[in-house]
Image (spheres, rainbow, N blue to C red):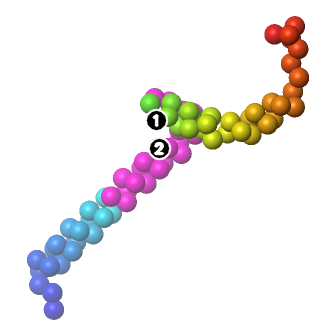
Amino acid sequence: MANLSDDSEAATVAGEILKSKERQMNIVAKLISQTKKPTGIAGLILAKAMNRAHSRITNWGLSFLEIGEDWI
């Protein structure tokens, strides 16, 4: 049978694991919220990453458009 200090240590370790998971979930939730309305440094980083990731499909789509000199 485990003694009280072993149970206490196990509870402490379990509590730290849960706190770590909560922090990770908070980070994920913040990143997801940045996709809606990017703000601050996190938003800037995310927007740049999204622009890079979508650049090929954007260029492909724009290749179908013809913009004349006098349209601007």
* Residue 19 covered by magenta stretch: no
Locate the N terminus and report the quarter of the image it occupies: bottom left
In the rendering, which numbered label is found on residue 30? 2
Q: Where does the magenta region start and end?
A: 20-40
The foreground one among 28 and 55 is 55
Do the residues bearing badges 2 and 1 touch, measured as CB atoms within 8 Å?
Answer: yes
Identify the element where label 2 is drawn: helix
**Horizontal side of residue 39 vs 21, given as left or right:** right
Q: Position of residue 34 (x, y in %)?
A: 53, 38
Name the residue beneath numbered marker 1: 42
Q: Nearer the viewer, mark 2 or mark 1?
A: 1
Q: Nearer the viewer, residue 16 or 58?
A: 58
Where on the picture, by quarter, is residue 61? top right
- Identify the amino acid type marked 2: Lys
Residue 36 lies in the magenta-colored region? yes
**Residue depicted at 53% across the width and 42% down the height:** 33
| Residue type (three-letter) at the residue carrying disc 1 | Ala
Residue 46, x across and y down, in percent: 53, 37
Asked whether 58 or 3 is in front, the reply is 58
Depth check, front residue: 29 or 60: 60
State the image quarter where residue 6 is shown: bottom left
Residue 65 place in picture, x, y as percent? 87, 27
Say few, some or many: other residues with alpha carbon within 10 Å of mark 2 (under 14 / 14 to 19 / 20 or more). few
- Report whether residue 36 is seen: no
Q: Mark 1 or mark 2, which is nearer the start of the sequence?
A: 2
